[in-house]
């Protein structure tokens, strides 16, 4: 596909308000934890605060557990808690799962966010896989219960993140996507009346489902499933709620980017095994898919120029227009959206719908912790092919707390190895009374 040379600033669809969406301020968290511990003389040290918060998850009072979870989220947003996770990974996971099973809606939402942050912190590997295996069933069960929107949205986002990080097999991702999709298409018994799904839940389902779709090979899904998904997403483009339309538009753009629509149209025309379909079935299937694509193109074109209606905000309307202008340009000319955003002093770039959707979802989920994680989280570096300049990491070291310094100077960290090399060379050169030469030489050293 082609790429646009003239980048629109609004193509990123990145809401700056997410940067301020952390649970609460550091001062509030410290105050909360002091009240949890019952002591006014608590040392405000991040390691000890996390230990206190983890201990507070065993308390019977729900409000105490909520404060503790909020403190844990704040800590994980502020810094990459590698040492704490190494020691307390299993304990934190299972206490959060207990909160999902028995907590209030607020506690469940906080626990879900904490589990998602835990998964992003540990990165891909055995621990992430354990998080997915242990969390999938409780999350699925909690989603089946009638509840408020905050809880449902948090459960969906948690399931999306832990699957994104922990799934190693296609079947695992498909299972999570199916759990999400069932909220929109529940299997009802003969005596059960279907309940209209709120727009906020529809948006959350489609966004989480699309986020996981970015990790899938479109060819692994069969034609029938794709046709049903595309047809349903097309109906969402006609809904009144603008957030629903935007989420459906992103999903459809991703599906078209994978080339799945063309693939299934070709399959209906000529089966992969070279056999001949019955004439009517072949023509009907091929015509239906092409007709669906034409319908979507017309819908996208209309939404890209939609006038503001009653009760609509300018911000929402502009977001919709900008998105569907990009989708239209992609469908008609093959140009994919490109963005470039600054992370510290470094530039993060995306050039596909898949990358853009991943970036938007994770930025929303991390909120105020997005920049910190993008700077320090190796898993996210791998996801986006993003490598911050080491000088920016080293440049803030003088501002680090004692807990942060211990984290970055752990035996396995790059910074610790570099520091060891530094000290060894310093000792050797000091013996030769050549410290000045060494100081200059370190400026060219590859750290």
Image: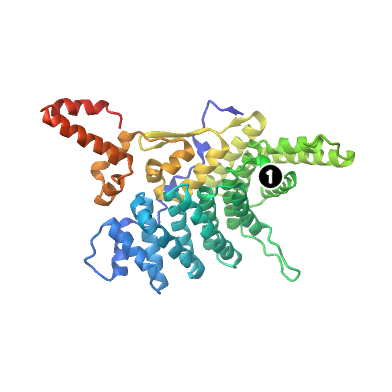
Query: Which picture quadrant has residue 325?
Result: top right
Scheme by which the image is coloured: rainbow
Pinpoint residue 157: horizontal percent, then vertical percent.
Answer: 52, 54
At a point 72% along the width and 45% down the height, the residue shown is 222
In this rendering, position of residue 114 left or right of residue 170: left
* Nearer to us in this view, 16 or 380: 380
Query: Which picture quadrant has residue 371?
Result: top left
In the image, residue 141 sits, relative to residue 164, either above or below, namely below
In the displayed orientation, state which residue is furthest to the bottom: 60
Tag 1 secondary structure: loop
Query: Which picture quadrant has residue 304?
Result: top right
In the displayed orientation, state which residue is furthest to the left: 433
In this rendering, position of residue 389 left or right of residue 239: left
Q: In the rendered image, is residue 206 in sight?
A: no
Q: In the rendered image, is residue 64 in sight?
A: yes
At a point 24% along the width and 64% down the height, the residue shown is 42
Please state the total of marks drawn on the protein image. 1
Disc 1: which residue: 221
Where is the N terminus found, in terms of image quarters? top right
Crowd around label 1: few <14 · some 14–19 · many ≥20 (10 Å): few
Pinpoint residue 437: horizontal percent, then vertical percent.
Answer: 16, 25
């Amino acid at each position: 596909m082609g790429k646009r040379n003239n980048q629109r600033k609004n193509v990123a669809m990145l809401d700056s308000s997410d940067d301020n969406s952390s649970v609460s301020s550091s001062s509030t968290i410290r105050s909360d934890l002091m009240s949890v511990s019952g002591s006014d003389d608590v040392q405000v040290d991040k390691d000890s605060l996390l230990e206190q918060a983890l201990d507070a998850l065993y308390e019977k009072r729900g409000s105490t557990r909520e404060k503790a979870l909020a403190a844990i989220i704040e800590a994980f947003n502020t810094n990459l808690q590698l040492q704490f996770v190494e020691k307390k990974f299993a304990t934190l996971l299972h206490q959060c799962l207990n909160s999902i099973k028995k907590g209030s809606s607020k506690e469940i939402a906080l626990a879900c966010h904490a589990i998602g942050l835990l998964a992003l912190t540990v990165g891909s590997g055995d621990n992430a896989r354990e998080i997915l295996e242990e969390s999938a069933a409780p999350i699925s069960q909690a989603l089946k219960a009638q509840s408020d929107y905050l809880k449902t949205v948090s459960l969906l986002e948690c399931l999306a993140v832990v699957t994104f990080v922990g799934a190693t097999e296609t079947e695992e991702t498909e299972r999570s996507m199916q759990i999400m999709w069932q909220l929109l298409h529940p299997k009802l018994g003969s005596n059960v009346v279907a309940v209209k799904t709120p727009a906020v839940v529809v948006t959350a389902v489609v966004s989480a489902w699309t986020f996981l779709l970015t990790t899938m090979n479109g060819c692994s899904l069969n034609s029938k499933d794709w046709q049903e998904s595309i047809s349903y997403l097309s109906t969402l483009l006609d809904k009144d709620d603008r957030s629903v339309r935007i989420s459906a538009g992103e999903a459809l753009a991703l599906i078209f980017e994978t080339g799945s629509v063309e693939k299934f149209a070709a399959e209906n025309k000529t089966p992969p095994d070279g056999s001949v379909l019955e004439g009517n079935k072949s023509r009907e299937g091929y015509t239906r898919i092409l007709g669906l694509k034409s319908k979507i193109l017309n819908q996208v074109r209309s939404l890209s120029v939609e006038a503001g209606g009653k009760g609509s905000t300018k911000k929402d309307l502009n977001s919709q227009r900008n998105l569907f202008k990009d989708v239209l340009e992609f469908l008609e000319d093959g140009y994919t959206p490109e963005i470039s955003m600054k992370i510290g002093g470094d530039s993060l770039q995306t050039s596909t719908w898949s990358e853009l959707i991943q970036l938007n979802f994770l930025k929303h989920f991390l909120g105020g912790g997005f920049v910190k994680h993008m700077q320090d989280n190796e898993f996210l570096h791998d996801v986006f092919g993003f490598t911050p300049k080491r000088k920016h990491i080293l440049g803030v070291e003088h501002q680090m707390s004692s807990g942060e310094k211990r984290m970055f100077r752990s035996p396995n960290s790059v910074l610790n190895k570099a520091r060891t090399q530094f000290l060894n060379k310093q000792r050797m050169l000091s013996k030769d009374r050549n410290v000045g030469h060494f100081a200059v030489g370190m400026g060219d050293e590859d750290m």
